[in-house]
Amino acid sequence: MRMLVAVLALVLGTVAHATDLLPSWNDGPTKAALVSFVSRTTDPRSRDFLPPAERIAVFDNDGTLWAEQPMYVQMAFALDRVKVLAPQHPEWQDKEPFASLLKGDVKGALAGGEHAIAEIVMATHAGITTDEFEAVVRDWITTAKHPKTGRLYTEMVYQPMLELLAYLRANGFKTFIVSGGGVEFMRPWTERVYGIPPEQVVGSSIRTKYEMRDGEPVIARLPEIDFIDDKAGKPVGIHKFVGRRPIAAFGNSDGDFEMLEWTTSGPGRRLGLIVHHDDEAREFAYDRASAIGRLDRALDEAGRRGWLVVSMKNDWRNVYAPAR
Amino acid sequence: MRMLVAVLALVLGTVAHATDLLPSWNDGPTKAALVSFVSRTTDPRSRDFLPPAERIAVFDNDGTLWAEQPMYVQMAFALDRVKVLAPQHPEWQDKEPFASLLKGDVKGALAGGEHAIAEIVMATHAGITTDEFEAVVRDWITTAKHPKTGRLYTEMVYQPMLELLAYLRANGFKTFIVSGGGVEFMRPWTERVYGIPPEQVVGSSIRTKYEMRDGEPVIARLPEIDFIDDKAGKPVGIHKFVGRRPIAAFGNSDGDFEMLEWTTSGPGRRLGLIVHHDDEAREFAYDRASAIGRLDRALDEAGRRGWLVVSMKNDWRNVYAPAR
């Protein structure tokens, strides 16, 4: 048995040391800080050591794991869905925000603000069963293309973040998504794309109801908000779905402020990280003035709170994951 | 490397075959059905094979994993808590249901029905932070004793069910609790007692709110119901927190009916199991007429729905887990 253990240690040790699990991260202080955090929380000799059960890491989705410009992917989904459903809704031809949308005037449609968005979301996300909605999302996500790059949205996930997710998991972390986006818009594909199973996805949701249809049970999606997982809703969502305070949080906008604050205010070693979109050439450049993914207060306070700010331009060797 | 693989296969194979992982289950059709289900869903040569990601098993808690008589453990907690908090609430001396409770008249207090129970729950479960509540639960659960057996409540968990949980996990299943009880009453101890981490516990909840207190963020517990995870709420809770339909469900009362129905209506091989409390000598005997854990419709329909009915008296060699 001693021989077996020795052989195993050799094999595993060699693999662990020979491989840089973060090849898309340029060497520098950000990458060094990530590696140091993981090493300190997982090395049994470190005073910051935590057992695997405590190694909870939470990731925002839009703008943190994949691109969110020029509009949230879920909004693109909703707009496409309006077109698909329009023949069943002749009344939409004269009713805002649908009328503008169907004429191709997205700006006009969204001029109605939150109320218009809520109308579009409910019309496109409710009224069917959860199984039906899942099938719709699966179909859409495997075919819809980004208006600027012409790539599948799932090819616009950030390669460095995929590596970071895998690196954390290889070190015993459990990775969760905590997104303002709809939980049922994400769950059908997060396992395939991010390696994050449905039960580790926290997001906004609408109410559902269990009922019998033609003798078979279904879960029906109702046109009512259940939970908004954004801003101060993020720590609430974490507490509700995960049930413990994370030790690492990753975001990119002020919508992630409270999640970062809640995570990094806990005792012991903590990690907060903000992805700063400063790479116009390879992705998009935006922060304080952007309606989508506004990053203002969190950027101001990152320094004194000890949050890492990732420069996509300088810290990332690659941006998007290779097609697969 | 071939040598290493051969040695490993030998070591692991020997362990797997030499051990009965369900020693507290008497040999018979129930145990055989459990083993057969696990074998068929996990053997790659079986046409019912499912990858580990799909092996989701959900367990009710009260009456399924631990005793629920003569009253739900959480109700005992709430009643104890009323006594602890009474000095801060002089008004309770003249106000029902608290006045009766403080005189030791539980029956009188609960005569107010659901309204009385809601008042007791809110008074004892809300108004403090989630960290504070967790500490209160931890303290209580490690000291409070069952009125009849004098044992810790956590020693009144069912040994055969602990074995079943471990057996399923050893076969790649992910085990979840889906309980009508409060999620924050369970999470502080389910990992230690059942091996189920907080993020795999689904239950009823009250609303919470993220806020700053003395410059530190807290999550405050509010006196408002957020979600009732019982009856038709169980499939809704499963969908909301787990995000996929389980392939196995374990319950003991009509409160688990919809969870069993939802689980076993899915395609492919499914398992539904009801723990029937028919062991007056070693535990309690109750079903159709009991206010707590009423088992009536589910017992009637178990046969035609193919749900296993466990006789605690005949199927279980042991009932409670040994003290530890």
Image (cartoon, coloured by chain):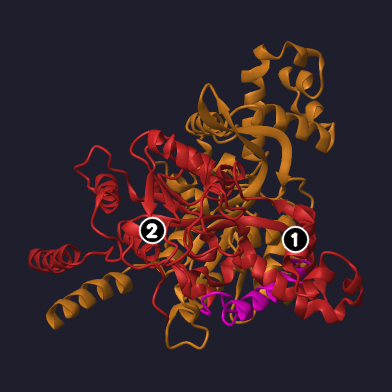
Chain colours: A red, B orange
**Is tag 2's residue or tag 1's residue first in the polypeptide sequence?**
1
Highlighted range, magenta: A124-151
Hey, which quadrant is residue A173 in on the image? bottom left
Question: Tag 2: residue type?
Answer: Met
Q: Chain of mark 2?
A: A
Confirm or deny contact between disc 2 and disc 1 (CB under 8 A): no
Q: Is residue B50 above or below residue A311?
A: below
Name the side, left or right, on which B151 lies relative to B4: right
Checking the image for residue B98, the label placed there is none
Question: Tag 1: residue type?
Answer: Leu
Name the side, left or right, on which B73 lies relative to A222: left
Residue at 51% of width from left, 35% of height from top?
B151
Name the side, left or right, on which A111 lies relative to B201: right
- Residue at the spot of label 2: A312
Q: Is residue B133 visible?
A: yes
Name the spot of residue A21 as percent of width and height, x first: 27, 64
- Residue at the spot of label 1: A110
Name the spot of residue A50 as percent of width and height, x first: 32, 44
Residue B134 falls inside the magenta stretch: no
Q: Residues within 10 Å of mark 2 (few under 14, many from 20)?
A: many
Location of the N terminus of chain A by quadrant is: bottom left
